[in-house]
Image (tube, rainbow, N blue to C red):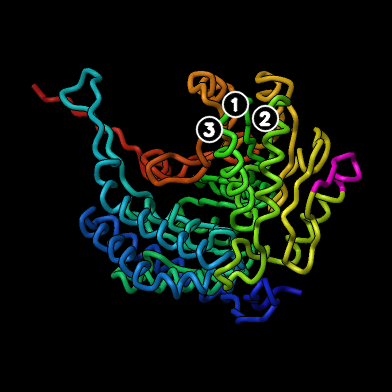
Amino acid sequence: MAVQTFKSIFPYTQELLAEYPLMDDRQLDQAISNASTAYQAWKKCSFYDRGKILKNTASILRRDQELLATLITKEMGKTTSEAMAEVEKCAGTAEYFADHSEILLKDEILEAGYSKSFVCFQPIGVILGIMPWNFPFWQVFRYAAPTIMAGNTTLLKHAPNVCGCAFALEKIFLEAGAPKGVFTTLIIDTPAVAKILSSDTTHAVTLTGSERAGGSVAALAGSNIKKSVMELGGSDALIVLPDADMQMAVSVALNSRMQNAGQSCIAAKRFIILKDAAQDFLQQFLIQLKNLRQGDPFDKMINMGPMARLDLAAALDQQLKNSVKMGAGLAYGGEMDGCNFKPALLLDVKKGMPAFDEETFGPVAAVILANDEADAIRLANDSRYGLAASIWTRDIQKGTDMAKQLEAGGVFINALVKSDPRLPFGGIKKSGYGRELDRHGILEFVNIKTIAVSQPE
């Protein structure tokens, strides 16, 4: 039987917050038409005028930060402090692209034997964004801010469990002064994506989500000759060398793996520790892990909330149990109570175990021992994913040399892996293709147009 409504549920208590009816075909057709109509005027707006609206959105985000953070926490369970930080990050990103898009899309002069030749960057139309629940505001702003500043309009298909956030986002853009159709929230199920991508008025799609979802949507986009960007799963390696600043490495490792209850594509999931560093690292890590306070995400005394859905917690529980059956050692945690999953530490993880081979989307740290630096690189690259990685060493040249050998879209040396509007973000292999953020991100959904001029004699 087809789904008729999406339910918003508070993960910590399983309280039903709201139900949202799906759009019918008529409503969807109207939304697509509105986005197409809006594009015709929006593409002609100046960067200054588009930027004013993005700056207005930043102001609204900060004005309503506490209210919006409460909505995020209710719908997906992250702590209120994490939700507040997410809203602020969106505001900063809106301001960044408001201030920099004109420069990022400036005409590029080329010498090719003509009187004048250059490349200009122009919008392409209506962009479909398919976004996940784990960062329900940030994931949207990460693509929407550059997309809208480039002169495109967007349709948002958000995750079913964060419909409240999806409507809040549309409301923010409208209040900021964006014309109707520039940013539109769709409440639709997966089959409707095919209808949108088959429409001649939709021109591209960007998806952040699972490998399975990415493969399906990429196939649809390809069959309809539509541009696509895929930011998919990750099994990021955190490599620790014996000369690392161990206190900092442990602290960042814990934060990277456990923030947002471990539900992040760029979380450090595989801790690849050189044997000479293992004892020191694990001793400190276990102490900090046991000090985590998990519970009600609205309680200011806790620093980790529940996972977002029961099915997600159950899937992680199965991955952990299967890894233990195959020989991994459960050093701490792993108990599940509804969506509350106690942070876990797995030792002796090896190739072939789910904790090594699969993306573990929750608070489970998998420790893998490496014999030396070459072995660490081999282990890190022995994955079908290639999103990001980090290296911890005091020898910056060695860290840089190792970073160049890692198969990943980004490598951070002695720093937390994170997305930043000033840096391109994306992966390789099964982690997807294309880039978000910075100049590389804003160029994904523009027409890179060559203009060559010969002066008549």
Mark 1: amino acid: Leu
Mark 3: amino acid: Val
Q: Residue at x 52, y 45 (%)?
A: 229
Q: Residue at x 71, y 46 (%)?
A: 286
In this view, the residue farthest toward the right is: 325
In this view, the residue farthest toward the left is: 457
Mark 2: amino acid: Ala
> Disc count in the image?
3
Res 216 seen here: no
User: Observer-nearest residue: 179 or 143?
Assistant: 143
Mark 3, residue position: 411
Quarter of the rendering containing residue 384: top right
Classify residue 143 as left or right of residue 407: left
* Position of the N terminus by quadrant: bottom right
Mark 2, residue position: 380
Q: Secondary structure at mark 3?
A: strand
What numbered label is drawn on residue 406? 1
